[in-house]
């Protein structure tokens, strides 16, 4: 299974490059893949979720939503 070398950071829109090297046996569903944003320097740990290119990170959107919600909670405090 292939995972992208880079993703787009939802926080700042810059490119986040992959930190994790592929395991010897290749990526599998459930593996964590870490990315570091070149813009805001945030780290993203994503879970490999499926074989389809469109669903490589099924948890991507929901995790980002959770992060955004956490940030919104922080702003309220
Ligand atoms: Zn960023």
Image: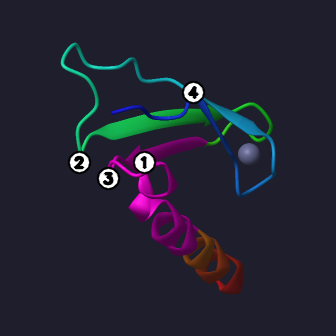
SS under mark 4 = loop
Q: Are marks 2 and 3 in contact (CB under 8 Å)?
A: no
Which callout, 3 or 4, points to the residue nearer the camera?
Answer: 3
**What's the mark number on residue 30?**
2
* Residue 56 to residue 25: above or below: below
For residue 55: magenta?
yes
Q: Which residue is mark 4?
A: 5
Residue 29 horizontal/vertical position (percent): 24, 46
Task: Mark 4: give few (<14), some (14-19) or many (20+) Cα within 10 Å.
Answer: few
Residue 3 horizontal/vertical position (percent): 45, 34
Q: Which residue is mark 3?
A: 50
* Span colored in magenta: 43-67
Spatial CA distance of label 1 from label 2 is 9 Å
Between discs 4 and 1, the one toward the N terminus: 4
Q: Residue at x 32, y 40 (%)?
A: 32
Q: Which quadrant holds residue 24?
A: top left
Q: Which quadrant holds residue 45?
A: top left
Between discs 1 and 2, the one toward the N terminus: 2
**What's the mark number on residue 46?**
1
């Amino acid at each position: 299974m292939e995972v992208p070398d880079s993703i787009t950071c939802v926080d700042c829109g810059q490119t986040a490059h992959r930190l994790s090297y592929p395991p010897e046996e290749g990526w599998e569903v459930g593996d964590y893949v870490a990315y570091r944003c070149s813009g805001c320097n945030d780290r993203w740990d994503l879970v490999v979720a499926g074989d389809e290119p469109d669903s490589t990170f099924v948890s991507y959107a929901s995790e980002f939503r959770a992060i955004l919600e956490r940030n919104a909670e922080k702003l309220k405090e």
